[in-house]
Amino acid sequence: MTPRSFLLTAELADYVRASSEPLDDVMADLVRETAEMAERGEVSPTMQIAPEQGVLMRLLTRAVGARRAIEIGTFTGFSALCIAEGLPDDGSLLCLDISEEWTAVARRYWARAGVADRIELRLGDALASLRALPQEETFDLAFVDADKTGYPGYVEELHPRMTRNGVVLLDNTLRGGQVLEPGDESDHALASLNASLAADPRWETALLPLADGLTLLRKR
Ligand SMILES: C[S@@+](CC[C@H](N)C(=O)[O-])C[C@H]1O[C@@H](n2cnc3c(N)ncnc32)[C@H](O)[C@@H]1O
């Protein structure tokens, strides 16, 4: 039930993980607890990012030297934990989500990992929370993984708040391949956003075929 890159066979996904930095014990336990929630039918098994994506996000957070980060769509906190572990001791991560229940799981694991003091969680609609942020509050790294139809609005609100060379990561930009033949409104939203970002001179854009598609946007 562990999420994996949909373009990989199960064997190749195992190989990719075995050839990368492993998850630490707290991360592995969080992945396991979330998989158990999915097995009980409490959540969808595709909600959490894949382990190989989490490992990449922790590396990227360190590599870009991010000090201040924001996440839109936190769920049980795995992606936030990966970002928080990549931040320096005085770094900070602002998490936006609407679910008190799922983020209660996140809070337990952040405390166990010793990164709770770097993370601020704001509950409520993410677009409203973003719009309420002062314009001078800026971020070096952003991760977007909430409601897919909200992505265009999140990207617009993030742009003025990103530092120069700041990186925005957008999850699920391949929609399991459905961007080629959009079915639901989330597929349409991502297909249309992918096309507009590729032509948007404000961002340098790279769509990685990792997990369910991970787009990297660098603010020019
Ligand atoms: C796919 S999950 C995020 C998974 C998480 N990044 C992880 O790796 O574990 C999407 C999350 O977005 C949240 N969400 C959906 N719509 C939202 C909205 N309008 N505002 C804030 N959060 C929202 C849901 O509550 C859910 O926790």
Image (spheres, rainbow, N blue to C red):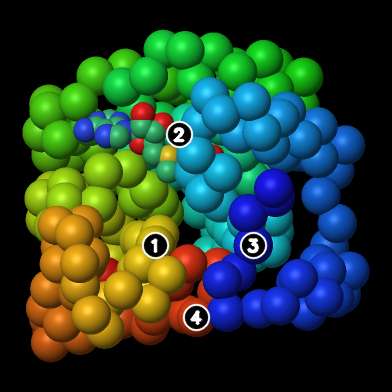
Residue 4: assigned label: 3
Q: CA distance from mark 1 to mark 4?
A: 10 Å
- Look at label 4 and name its amino acid: Pro
Q: Position of residue 119 (x, y in %)?
A: 52, 25
- For residue 32, side relative to residue 191 (left or right): right
- Look at label 3 and name its amino acid: Arg
Q: Position of residue 139 (x, y in %)?
A: 34, 47
Q: Secondary structure at mark 3?
A: loop
Answer whether labels 2 and 1 touch (C-beta < 8 Å): no
Q: Which residue is denoted by mark 4 in the rendering?
A: 209
State which tag comes first along the sequence, 4 or 3.
3
Q: CA distance from mark 2 to mark 3?
A: 18 Å
Neighbourhood count class around disc 3 (C-alpha, 10 Å): few under 14, some 14–19, many 20 upward:
many
Q: Position of residue 186 (x, y in %)?
A: 21, 57
Answer whether labels 1 and 4 touch (C-beta < 8 Å): no
Quadrant hosting ligand 1:
top left
